[in-house]
Image (cartoon, coloured by chain):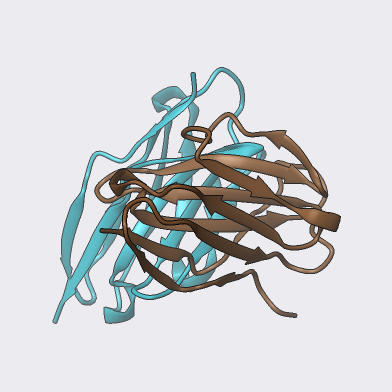
Amino acid sequence: EAGVTQFPSHSVIEKGQTVTLRCDPISGHDNLYWYRRVMGKEIKFLLHFVKESKQDESGMPNNRFLAERTGGTYSTLKVQPAELEDSGVYFCASSQGAPGNEQFFGPGTRLTVL
Amino acid sequence: AQSVTQPDIHITVSEGASLELRCNYSYGATPYLFWYVQSPGQGLQLLLKYFSGDTLVQGIKGFEAEFKRSQSSFNLRKPSVHWSDAAEYFCALNDYKLSFGAGTTVTVRA
């Protein structure tokens, strides 16, 4: 069974550009989460999908971030326009069943904004 | 509000020696606690979890953790460290979304 995959693994963009990160959860997992780790800080929750619905987006930093999960399968996280402070590693995780169950993480996307 | 604290940013241990990583939490109810490990270039891998019941939890790779409610702690231990245990370790509290500690980087010296 394939694990959680994320694309790209690295992205380097200029300030003001747009970047879209993609996450493919484990097949059959209804819960999908986005987390972010900014350099030197803790891993922070961004948002949670159940199927295609946003259950909690309280961790989204601002309206430059837009997450979607069309059809309840893969998810995208778009940053537009990117700022320097958006640099970090973006992790996606998925789980099945109750939201408190084990979350399986992808390898992360390292975003660098210059 | 819930929070997780890992007091040690970096620990160096000799191969074959024991390892203990500290984790303290703040939460208003019985917590669901996890330890994850991230090796260089890899994603986060679950080592073990505590939901309820036995307070000594066994995990993968020879790790164990003990939940102590009176101390609000969930410390991770391994009796004998291998060079492959060099990684960053995260304690996390699961309230359907994970709250992570800052992480502890473990260096293993020969």
Can residue A91 be seen here?
Answer: yes
Q: Quadrant of the N terminus of chain A?
A: bottom right
Residue at screen point 58% across, 29% down: A58
Give the x, y percent position of residue A28: 84, 63
Q: Is residue A1 left or right of residue B66?
A: right
Residue B6: image x %, image y %?
31, 41
* Picture layout, residue B12 above or below residue B27: below
Instruction: Locate residue B19: give its quadrant.
Output: bottom left
* Colour for chain A in the figure: brown
Quarter occupied by residue B74: top left
Q: Position of residue A47 (x, y in %)?
A: 61, 40
Asked if B47 appears above or below B68 in the picture, the reply is below
In this view, A41 is above or below B80: above
State which chain is coloured cyan: B
Query: Would residue B84 be found to the left or right of residue A70 on screen?
Result: left
Q: Residue at x 18, y 57 (%)?
A: B11
Q: Toward the viewer: A106 or B52?
A: A106
Task: In this rendered view, identify the residue nearer to me: B11 or A63.
Answer: A63
Residue B71: percent from left, percent from top: 39, 26
Residue occupying image coordinates x 33% and y 48% = A38
